[in-house]
Image: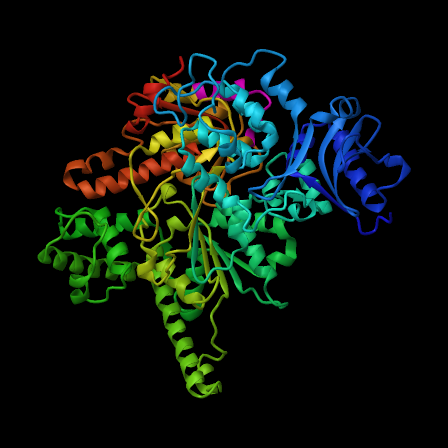
Amino acid sequence: MTGKNVTLRLLDKADREILKLPRPVKGAIYDFQHKFKTNPDSAGLRLKQLQGHDKLYSARINDEYRALLLRLADDDWLIVSVKHRKDVYAHLDRLTYSVNRVTGGIEYVDLQVVQEEVLSPPAPQTATPSLPTEPLHPAEPAAAQPLFEKWSEQQLTDLGVAPSLIPVVAALTTEDQLLGLVEYAPQLTGEVLLALYDGKAYDDVLEQVTAPVAAPEPVDTEDFRAAVERPATIVTTTDDALREALEGEDFGRWKVFLHPTQAKLVTRDYSGPARVGGGPGTGKTIVALHRVKHLVEQLPADRTKPVLLTTYNKNLAADLRSRLLALGGEPLLSRVEISHVDQLALRTVREAEPGNRKRIIDEAQAVREWRSLLDELGEDGWDAEFLNDEWTQVILGQAVTSRTDYFRARRAGRGRTVSRSERAEIWQLAERFTQRLDRLEVQTWDQIAERAAQLETERARRIQAIDRQREEAGGLDNIHMADGSGGWLRYRYRHIVVDEAQDLRPAHWKMLRAMTAPDRNDLFLVGDTHQRIYKNQVTLGSLGINIRGRSSKLSLSYRTTRQILRSALNVLGEETYDDLDGSTETLAGYRSVLSGAVPDLHRLNDWEDEREAIAALIESWGDVPHEQIAIAVPTNQMASEAANTLAQHGIRALEIGPDGPRGDSGVHIGTMFRFKGLEYQRMIIAGVTDGLVPRASVQQRRTTDPARYRTEMQRARSLLFVAATRARDSLDVFWHGEPSPFLKELIKVRPPVAA
C-alpha cells in the first residue's frame, strides 16, 4: 500500500486519553502519525488486525505503547485509543465500536475499562457533595436502586445511548458511578444520561439533547466511511490540529473541535439575521469565531475585508482577534475587520466629520455633568441617573429631535411614568445638558453611536436609491448619482458577526443594520441576556433586525462544573429575561457534563479579614498558576486594596483595566464588570455583602421607583452570575457583615466554612 494518500484521523475521546500520557509518549504519537501516513505497512509500525475484529487494528507507537485504529477504508484510518502494550490484547472481546443509529457518528467503548473504573473501582470513591435543596437532579435513593430503571432499553437507545453500554447503564446505582461512566462514554450517551438524572422529562431530553445532533438522513450503521464525515464523529486530521490535541490541555480544544450542535449553526445558510443564545460556557463565542471562518471561506479571492467581527468593548475585541488568528492565521485575519462597536462608531463619525475632535466622556462622567447642571439650576426634584437614562435611552435612542417628537416617544421599559408637564421639563433640561456638553467640547459614547447610526442609515438610503435607479434604467448605473461622495457607494460589509450581543445599545444596532445589505447571512449574533451587565435592553425587530424563526440556543456548558452551575443558577432566582426580540428567554436545558467540588462560602467579620483569608486560601493552593486565579470585587477601590494585601503576602497581583490585565503573570483582580468573556481555573468573588451587591442606592429605589429597582436588581444578579460562571474548577464566595440577598438560597443549602 502506498502511503502518499493515507488519511489518519484521531477520535476526540482518544485525544483526551492521550492528554493524560507522559510528554515523551505524546511526542512519539506525533512521530507515529507522520510515519503511518507515509507508509502504514512499514515493518517498524507492526500494523496487524486484532483477533475477532474485522475493522480494529493495532500499530506500534514505541516500545511501550500501541495505537488502536479502525480501518474505515483502504487508505482511511481512525485512531480510537492509545494503550500500553500489555493492555492491548488482554480483553479483545471487550472492545466495541459502532455507528450510532441516531447521530450517525462513530463510537468506541472499552467495556473492560468501564467495568474496572466505573462499576468495580479499585478503591472506595468519595461521593461528590451536592446541594440538598432544589438540586438539578433527584435526591439519591437510600437503597441501591438502579438510577435508570424507569426507562427501557429501547427508550435509551432511541435517545442515542450506545447499545454496548446499556447493561452498564442498567447497573448504575450512584451518582459517582454515573459521573465515572460519563468520563468514558461517547458524548451523546453522557449528555442523555445526565439530563435524565437531572430530572428532565423523556420528551424534553429527546427534543433538547438528542434531536439537535440527530443525522438528517437515515443512517447505515455498517458504513463507517460515511460515519466519519458526519459532525457527530469529532476527529482531527491535520498536523496542526493533532498538535493542538496533544498539547492543548483543553484550553486549545475549541480550535479543533465543534460539538455537532455548534457545527450545524456555524455552517447553516440563513435567509436573514440569525441569533445564537445559551448560558455561560456553552461555546457561543466559539461558534461566532468558526462562523467568521466559514463565511470567509465562501468569499471570492480578494484583498478586501467584507466580514466584520464586533463586540461591546476593547478588551473583548482584542481577545477575539487573538483567537481568530489562532483559528485561521493571517490569511483568515486579512479578510476580517475586528473592532469593538464604539470604536467602529467613532471611526464612522470622524470619517464623515473630520473636524469633530471633542473629548469623549463615559457614562459616569455624564451623570456627574447632569448633577452639576441640576445643582447650578437649583433643581432638586430630578435624579441625575434617571435623566441620563431618559436622555440616552429615549431621546438619543429614538433619535428624538424636537419637543413634539419627545411627547410622542415610546418609553417602554423605562418604568416610571411621566406626565406631559414632566416631559416638557425633561426636554428643557435635556436641551440645556447638550448645550453644556457643547460648551465643554465633550461628547458621550451614546451621542457618537447615535450620530454613526444616522450617518450609516443615510448612506444605506442612498445605496438603495441607486439600486432603484439602476433597476428602473434596466441595470445601467447613473455615474453622477453613484459617485456623489468621490467613490462608488456600497455597503461597508457583506457579513457582520456580533459577540456579546446583549450589551449593545439600540444605536449600535441601527448602525450595524445599515452597514450590510439585507440579504442571506447578513447578521449573525451571539449572546445571553442572563449575562447583560449594561442597561441596553432592546427589541431587535423594532430596529429592523428580524431574527424571528432564526434563533437557536446552546445548552451544554464546556467550562462550568455541575456544582458551580447549580450555585450560579440559584443566584439568578426567579427573574425573567428577554430574548432580544420581545419574548422571554430561559436557561431550560442548560447543563454540564463536568463534575467538581461544591462552591465554598466564607463569612468574615470585615473587609480586612476577607482580604487576609483570600491570601491564605491562595497560598494553600500551592502550584496552581497565579494567572489561572481571579478575584472579582464590587468596586475599583476594593480591587486595589485586595492587590495590596496579596502583595504583603508575596503574591503578585494584576489589576484588570479596560484593556485587560496590566501585566503577564499574577493573580487577576478586578471589578465584576471586567471578567466578562474570561475564564479561570479558580475563581474568588469577594465583598458579596448587602449594600455592595447590589449597591445600597439600588435598594433605596424599591419604593421610590419600583420599575427601575427591578431592572437594576436584575442587572446586579446578572453581574454576580457572570462572575460565578467564569470558574472552571472551583468557586469561593466571600463576604463580611450581612451577605448579599442574592446568596440567600445558597447559604440555606451550603453553610459558610469556618473562618
Write the residue at 24% across / 62% down. Answer: 435
Q: Position of residue 610 (x, y in %)?
A: 39, 21
Q: Foreground residue, 736 or 608? A: 736
Residue span colored magenta? 613-627
Q: Is residue 626 left or right of residue 610?
A: right
Decide: is 299 above or below 163.
below
Task: Specify whether residue 614 is painted magenta.
Answer: yes
Q: Foreground residue, 558 or 348? A: 558
In which quadrant will I find the C terminus?
top left
- Residue 587, quarter of the rendered image: top left
Is most of the magenta stretch helix, strand or loop? helix
Task: Specify whether residue 649 is painted magenta.
Answer: no
Write the residue at 45% across / 84% down. Answer: 470
Write the residue at 24% across / 64% down. Answer: 400
Write the residue at 53% across / 52% down. Answer: 266
Q: Position of residue 404 (x, y in %)?
A: 16, 66
Decide: is 394 above or below 30.
below
Q: Position of residue 27 (x, y in %)?
A: 77, 34
Residue 319 visible to an observer of this rendering = no
